[in-house]
Image (spheres, rainbow, N blue to C red):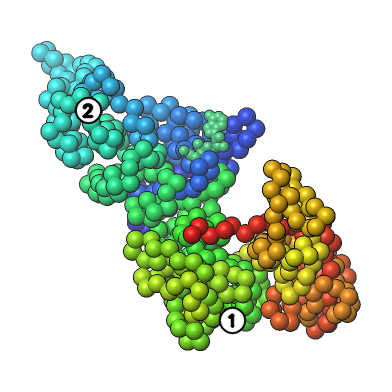
Amino acid sequence: MENKEKIIELKGVEKVFDGQTAVEKMDLYIRKGEFVTLLGPSGCGKSTTLRMIAGFEMPTSGQILLNGKDITNVPPYERPINTVFQRYALFPHLNVYDNIAYGLKLKRFRNTYVDKKGKERVRIEKLSKEVIDAKVSRVLKLVDLEEFEKRDVTTLSGGQQQRIAIARAIVNEPEILLLDEPLGALDLKMRKDMQLELKDMHQKLGITFIYVTHDQEEALTMSDTIVVMSDGTIQQIGTPKDIYNEPKNSFVADFIGESNIFSGTMVGSKKVRFINKVFDCVDDFPINEKVDVVVRPEDVFLADEGKGMVDGVIISSIFKGVHYEMTFKVGKTEVVIQDTIERKVGERCSIHIRPDDIHIMAKEFDCNRYDGYITKRNTVCFADGEFECDVTQLYEHSHLDEEGYLILENGESIDLTDVDVKVEVGLKDIEIIDNDEDGDACGTIISIVYKGDHYQIIIRTDDEEEDFVVDTEYVWNENDRVSVKIPKDKIRLKLKAVNQK
Ligand code: ADP
Ligand code: MG
C-alpha cells in the first residue's frame, strides 16, 4: 500500500454552515485502490467530508485534489466518482435492469470515424444496446443478482435493493466509490453479509472505496485505513490494528472498543501506577506525567484471590453470547473484564494484565478527576479526604430538606449515602496549607514543575496514593508535608453511570 499514489487529497479543507464549523481544516490523502473508512459519531462531519469529495458541497476554504489536479470547482458529474447512500434511491417505476442502465443510456460520447470519402469526422454517440447489456450483466454478477434483471425493484428485499444501488454506482466504472452508511438501513444479519460482499467487491473491482460509518466494528472489519473523526476534526488515521491497539487518545480508545480507561501516573521508566498498583508497561513517558491508561476488557485475566496483581471483587456479570462481561471492583475503580469463564457476583478474585496490553496515552491534564462517594453527612470522600460539597448539583432542580435528604424536582426524596460519584476539581481551585492538619486531605509534595508563569505541584496522599495537581504562583519544596482545602463550590460532582445489570 505504501508505494501507491494518492488519488484524493484534501488540503486544509473546511466547511462552515451558517457560522457553524462542520469540518475543520482537514488534511487527508487517500491512496489509489485503498478501502478507507471515515469513522465517528453522528454529526462529526463524515457525510459533509464525503459530499465535498463528491462535489455536492463546496468547501468554505481549502483544496481538493484528484490525481494531483485541483477539482475543488469541478461539478459532481464531471468527477470520476459515484456515491451510494444509505437510502438506496432507486427508481420505483423501473425494473432492475433499467435502474442500473439508467445512467448508461444517458451517456453520450464523442466518436471519431472515417466517412465514405475517407474524411475524418466526429459524431456524438450513445452506448449501443449490446454494450449496455454487457455492462449491466457484469455488475449484476458482481452483486450476485444475475437472475434479477426483469424484477420490479419494489419486490426486492432491503439488502437486494442496496446491492442494486451499488451496481448502479459501479456500472459507470468510477475511479472512486463513495459509500455513506450504505448498510445503515439493513438488519444486523444482512449487514454482516453485505460487509463481506462489499469487501469482496472492492477486491474484484480494484477501485478506491471511501466508506462512511459510525459503526466501529464495521470499520475494523472492512477497512485498509480508518480515519477516526470527532467534532469535524481527524483524531487518528491508521490501520484497524493501529487504531485498535494504539489509540492515540482517549476519544479514539473509547469510541473504538469497550475499553477500560484509567487515570494513571508514570512512576518510573516504563512503570505506571493505576488502580492503586504499579504495573510494568512498554511505553515510556516522563516520570510523574499524568496519563490515560487503556486496557481492553479481553486483556484482563482473572485469577484466584492473591494469585494475580490486584485483588478485588466481582460486582456484575452478564452473558454476552460468547463470553461473560464482568465488572471487577478494586477500591473505587471498576474494571470491565471479558472472559469465557464466569466468576460469580460477590466472588473475590484477582486480576493480571500483561505489560504490552497496557496502552498509555499522554493526557492533556486540565483538571483533577477522582472516584468518590457521598457520606451520610452529604460530604464527599475522595483522595483520602472528606470534603464539603454541594450535592444538589447531582440532580437538576433538586434541593435538600432539613433532614438532609435530597428532594428532586418531582418531589421524590433520595438518600445519597454511599452513592458513587465522579469528582472534578480544577488545578487552580486547590489551596495548599503549610501543615498536614488543617486541610481536608494531606500528603507530600512529590513534584514541582515551573510552567512559565506558575508552578505545577503534585501532592500525593499517604494511603491511597492519589494525587492533587495544583497550579499555584507560590513556591513550595519537594517532600514538604502539606494538606489541601477545596472551596465547596469548586467541587464538581457527577453521578457515576450505573452498570446495566
Ligand atoms: P455525520 O455524517 O458525521 O453524521 P454531517 O457531516 O452530516 O455529520 O454533519 C456535520 C455537522 O454539519 C452537523 O452538525 C450537521 O448538523 C451540520 N450540517 C450538515 N449539513 C448541513 C447543511 N446542509 N446545513 C447546515 N448544517 C449542516
Ligand atoms: Mg452522515
Left or right for 488, reference 16: right
Q: Residues within 10 Å of mark 1 (few under 14, many from 20)?
A: some
Q: Secondary structure at mark 2?
A: helix
Q: Residues within 10 Å of mark 2 (few under 14, many from 20)?
A: few
Q: Amino acid at mark 2?
A: Thr
In the rendered image of this protein, does residue 239 appear above or below residue 130? below
Q: Amino acid at mark 1?
A: Val
Q: Residue at x 49, y 48 (%)?
A: 40
Q: Residue at x 33, y 40 (%)?
A: 186
- Residue 161, located in which quarter of the rendered image? top left
Q: Position of residue 320 (x, y in %)?
A: 38, 61
In the rendered image of this protein, does residue 2 appear above or below residue 275? above
Tell me the residue that label 1 is attached to.
278
Q: Position of residue 417 (x, y in %)?
A: 70, 64
Is ligand 2 closer than 8 angstroms to the Cβ of mark 2?
no
Left or right for 391, reference 119: right
Tell me the residue that label 2 is attached to.
155
In the rendered image of this protein, does residue 23 appear above or below residue 406? above
Q: Position of residue 125 (x, y in %)?
A: 21, 18
